[in-house]
Image (cartoon, rainbow, N blue to C red):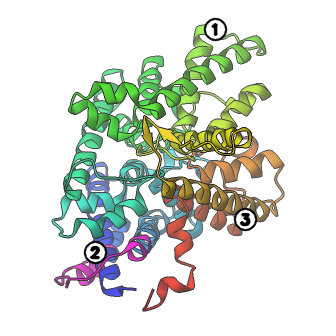
Amino acid sequence: MNLRIVLFYLGRVLGVGAISMVIPLILSLAFGDGSWPHILTAIIIAGVPALALSSRKLRKGNLFAREGYVITALGWILLSMIGALPFYMSGTIPSYIDAVFEVVSGFTTTGSTILTEVEHLGPSLLFWRSFTHWLGGMGVLVLILAILPMSGDSYHMNIMKAESAGPNVSKLVPRLRDTAISLYAIYFVMTILCAASLMLSGMKVLDAFCISFATAGTGGFCILNTGMNTYSTLSQALTTIWMILFGVSFTIYFLMIGKDWKSILKNEELRTYLGIIVVSAVLISFNVFLNSDSELGYFATLHHSFFTVGSIMTTTGFATLDFDLWPQFSKMILLTLMFIGACAGSTGGGIKVARLIILFKQAKKEIHLLFHPKAVRQVQLEGKTVEHSVIRSVNNYMIIYVMVFVASLLIVSLDKFDFATNFSAVAATMNNIGPGFSAVGPYGSYAGFTKISKIVLTADMLAGRLEILPILMLFHKNTWSRHF
């Protein structure tokens, strides 16, 4: 383990955390909400070690996959511990474990909350809470790769692989830093366009930016106790569109810039992703409309169905109404969408559509071989053969995913909640959704869980965002040995 290089990058992560809190500090001074001393203290606590760890020139050294995983996992943990300080020190969230839960939910773009009243936070802390979604959406370390000059693409690729979501991560352009810059440029422009469209639909400036941060990062934190229900139908419709767009792989937008329409139309994951959204929304709209006593007409029901499906499928977690009151058929579709998630290479969570396509095709291949043992058949995705290493990583991911899910569910079940609450709480946190069903529904919270359960669910959020392996690597004895 090259501890020198690990500490160097952890210093840069803390530096990004300190700099990112400058905006809420300015807002606190402007609005006079009294939170600025606590935000400033957090900036100093993050900034001093950041300068100490990363100011010295880094000697040449190898940054292998092991270091990449450790930097990513520890970086996100440290950033969350620092980011929780303004909430804890201000007393708005009296328990530090609860404050860490809330901030981890922000950085991992989950949107689960222990707060029953969000509006008492004040403008600056509400902004910081939503801004954590935007920082975590594309990835803090990807941001560092984009803004800071570095050498050694092959080594830094190990950091991007550890932080980015999907079965296979590759560079969009030859130089890794240019890839990181391209990703964040697209991400930034789309966020600004999202905020502008919401302001034009009637949202206040602060609301528009906070909702845009949550939409871009597919997070789901709202700044009103009523969630998205307060905003106009137009604002909700625009948010639906933007949620779905941010659930698309950013490779698609890179191809759009290059006007490679043929590759976009051939993209199997994109077609499957959009198809699942449309079919699910239509099925739910009919099911809710035919089995509900609500006075909503069909088109209003269709509107809320598309919003909810888009929110759950992209793992954003916004809600315009209490979908926990919907018929069981509709709730089962939503539960299924929680596990499917968005596209690989997007800001969304979940298992990812690409993984499920590969698993389905692998199963289809095995069934074919039962009837034709001597046949030679390869798994293909978008006309290209999927490498065996990718298939193996997908299979391994699913095995570990199920093991972590079951272990988490057993521990959380020690709390005195019903099965729907426990199961959906683990599913919602591990897939970075936010709301679940029953006590953790769209108008509920995670406040009732014990500290042990909150720690487990916090770990699930981190594992879900970082796709499990970086977190597990911290507990493997070989990770910390000198020779590997």
Quadrant containing the C terminus is: bottom left
Q: Which residue is mark 1?
A: 298
Q: Position of residue 55 (x, y in %)?
A: 19, 80
Q: Residue at x 30, y 42 (%)?
A: 187
Kindly identify which numbered label has been placed on residue 450: 3
Q: Amino acid at mark 1?
A: Tyr
Q: Which residue is mark 2?
A: 47
In this view of the protein, which residue sits in the foreground, 241 or 371?
371
Q: Amino acid at mark 2?
A: Gly
Q: Residue at x 32, y 76 (%)?
A: 63
Q: Local crowd at mark 1 within 10 Å, few (<14), some, or many (≥20)? A: some
In this view of the protein, which residue sits in the foreground, 211 or 124?
211
Labels 2 and 3: the sequence-earlier one: 2
Camera-side mark, 1 or 3 = 1
In this view of the protein, which residue sits in the foreground, 398 or 26?
398
Camera-side mark, 2 or 1 = 1
Q: Is residue 186 left or right of residue 133?
A: left
Labels 1 and 3: the sequence-earlier one: 1
Q: Which residues are magenta?
A: 46-69
Q: Residue at x 63, y 48 (%)?
A: 428
Write down the quadrant of residue 450 in the picture: bottom right
